[in-house]
Image (tube, rainbow, N blue to C red):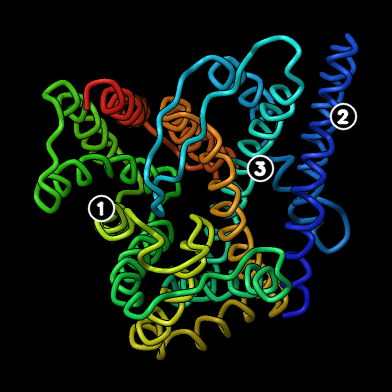
Amino acid sequence: MGAYQRMGEVFATRVLPAIEEAGERLEAQVMDGANDGANEGLEQLLRSAEGFVGGGGQYGATAKVLRRTQMSPLRKHADAMRPLLMSTETGDSATTIDKVDIPKTFSTAPGKKSDLGETLKTGTYFALWYAFNILYNIYNKQALNVLPNPWSVAWAQMFIGIPLFLPLWLTGIRKAPKLKEGALKTLIPQGLFHTGTHVGAVVALGAGAVSFAHIVKAAEPVFTAGLSAAVLGQYLSPITYSALIPVVAGVGLASAKELSFTWTSFGFAMLSNISSSLRGIFGKKTMSDPKAVGENLTAANQYSLLTIISCIALLPLSAFFEYKTLVPNWQAAVANGVTDLALAKLVVLSGIFYYLYNEVAFLALSRVNPVTHAVGNTMKRVVIILASIVVFRNPITPLGAIGSGVAILGTLLYSLAKQKFG
């Protein structure tokens, strides 16, 4: 576990401080009129982000994946985010696992040196979030292609996250959560919903194309809207509900025209949607005041606690569903030419990038307003779908592509309508 611990410590003590330091240097260049130097500095910063996940040596395979999925769209997206980040206003929100505190908008007033550095850091967080998410989906699918045991892989991914955040608590780099009596009654149900969210997605990704699973996942707002009304008694405006029509239509069209359609992939993606919606709703209902549950319950710490609960919950489930097939499937993969080390590496890297993309997502989304949040989430799904099509060469029909586009556009319209009309 030493390697995982070192990676967690390096991420917290070197990568994030390096982003801050680079942002401050770039601010100074702009304040001195050196705009060209600042632009070059941003490119260097993004290349450094690539290097963290794609360096040579034992992580050479990661570099290869990054080259294949191309980081240049991430740079362009980081640039495209700047007008949104610099101009829109924000509101405040209670902290939950799905919606973290939203700070005030960044000012564009001249002479305020903090503005550019904050924007650069936000853009870099988004680039890292997208990169880590792409890498997770690729390594996860590669692992499942040779080891068709999604329950066991899902458990391993949860377990691998623990030695990444535990050293941060033990060393004091991140304040460890202190739970009050009865806190587990609040956290365990949310952790079980988190378990369903993750294992549903992993099974769906293993049973079908990555692009198809993410199209079905785009239907999550439909369940969130319905369950919010049923559980919380919260109703949305007719305009917002109407934005769900293209989501349903798009997912339906994409599913009907999906060449690699399987009911297993579709069904477990829907299970993931329902679980994710319930996790968010339950979080809003029970975690509206984190201080009532304990201390130091930041969004990242809440996610870490849910990771522990999910790891515990998934162990007996994976044993129940796959105790007869895990060892034979592993042996079959080795017999087909995949070494034990290569197979273990795929599983471990999928777990590392699963944790890292969630960690960076909190850093990215906590720094932007709801509109940018919605755009960022939508673009993330587009980037993952495109990257998976490039890497795995999954065929997609013209009507399937249209359905995918309609569904993704519908999720964006729903998010924007919800912010404007409620």
Q: Are marks 3 and 1 in contact (CB under 8 Å)?
A: no
Quadrant (top left/top right/bottom left/bottom right) for the N terminus: bottom right
Q: How busy is the neighbourhood of tag 2: few (under 14 within 10 Å), some, or many (20 plus)?
A: some
Q: Position of residue 80 (x, y in %)?
A: 60, 18
Among the 4 quarters of the image, the one containing residue 222: top left
Q: Position of residue 42 (x, y in %)?
A: 80, 26
Q: Nearer the viewer, residue 131 or 187?
A: 187
Q: Is residue 306 left or right of residue 7?
A: left
Q: Is residue 37 left or right of residue 158?
A: right
Q: Label 3 belongs to which residue?
A: 128
Q: Is residue 201 left or right of residue 117?
A: left
State which tag comes first along the sequence, 3 or 1.
3
Q: Label 2 belongs to which residue?
A: 25
Task: Report, in whole angstroms, how far the alpha carbon at label 3 lies from the one at label 2.
Answer: 20 Å
Total count of labels: 3
Q: Nearer the viewer, residue 224 or 237?
A: 237
Q: How busy is the neighbourhood of tag 3: few (under 14 within 10 Å), some, or many (20 plus)?
A: many
Residue 161 versus residue 422 in the image, above or below: below
What residue type is disc 2 on? Arg
**Residue pictured at 61% horizontal, 36% vertical:** 126
Q: Label 1 belongs to which residue?
A: 281
What residue type is disc 1 on? Ile
Element type at marker 2?
helix
Residue 180 versus residue 199 in the image, above or below: below
**Residue pictured at 48% horizontal, 75% vertical:** 308
Element type at marker 1?
helix
Q: Position of residue 307 (x, y in %)?
A: 48, 69
Among the 4 quarters of the image, the one containing residue 294: bottom left
Quadrant (top left/top right/bottom left/bottom right) for the C terminus: top left
Task: Report, in whole angstroms, how far the alpha carbon at label 1 lies from the one at label 2.
Answer: 41 Å
State which tag comes first along the sequence, 1 or 2.
2
